[in-house]
Amino acid sequence: MKTLNYIIVLALCMLVSTACNGSKKQEINNQETKEIMNSDKKAIVVFFSHAGDNYAVGNIEVGNTKIVADYISELTGAEQFEIATHKYDGMAYNPLIKLAQEEAEKGELPEYEGDVDLSQYDTVFIGGPVWWGTYPQVMFTFFKKHRDDMKGKTVIPFTTHEGSGLANCVDDVKKTFPGANVMKGFSIYGHEVRTERAKVEKWLKGVGN
């Protein structure tokens, strides 16, 4: 009986040790990523994310791009500004993509809520889903307003998608912000974002290098 009790206690100790080591390893990884992004420089994640009916993941309460934006903030300490509009609220997927196509063809610039002062930031992550080969038109409303604010800044595009990858997003960002240092973009499948945080972490470490 004493031997059995000893084995049980030893097993419990090993489990506690493994959990602590795993937690410590995650903490170290997060700190390494923040150091890579340079804590002396301020960063912000500017993004548009669509909740509700989405291709491949169904009706979701938190948009795919929002989840990636949260990962970036957690790993780098970056602040956030969400390009928000109620224009697409409650729309089913098919009507939404039809509307998005019409907006893109007409070059419409839907209004968004609130705004942000970008002058205090050195690095700007820009993220959104891919709608008809590029970012949603509401993001271009933001881009037009802040075109001159990006001069001299490091701009890092990212997308969530279901097969489009980065599409034309990086090229469009470069055209819109010719005075910015636009870095290589990152894309991730929307259906992966809830389980593949490690891919975002790996990308951010690559950005630092």
Image (spheres, rainbow, N blue to C red):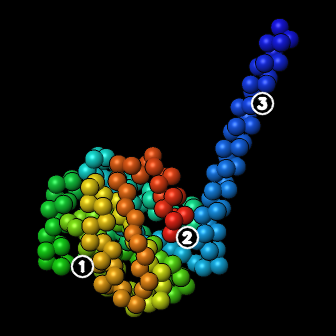
Residue bearing mark 2: 208
- Tell me the crowding category of disc 1: few under 14, some 14 to 19, or many 20 or more residues within 10 angstroms, Cα based: some
Q: Nearer the viewer, mark 3 or mark 1?
A: 3
Task: Name the spot of residue 138 as percent of width and height, x first.
Answer: 29, 74
Q: Is disc 2 placed on a helix, strand or loop?
A: helix
* Disc 3 and disc 1 in contact, CB within 8 angstroms: no
Distance between the alpha carbons at the discs numbered 2 and 3: 37 Å
Q: Which of the labelled discs sits on residue 13, or is there none?
A: 3
* Disc 1 and disc 2 in contact, CB within 8 angstroms: no
Q: Is disc 3 placed on a helix, strand or loop?
A: helix
Task: Name the spot of residue 32 as percent of width and height, x first.
Answer: 64, 62
Residue bearing mark 1: 109
* Residue 174 drawn above or below residue 69: below
- Most foreground residue, 2 or 109: 2
Location of residue 41 (image quadrant): bottom right
Residue in the image at 44% along x and 83% along y: 181
> What quarter of the picture does the N terminus occupy?
top right
Amino acid carrying label 3: it is: Cys
Distance between the alpha carbons at the discs numbered 1 and 2: 33 Å
Q: Residue furthest top?
A: 1
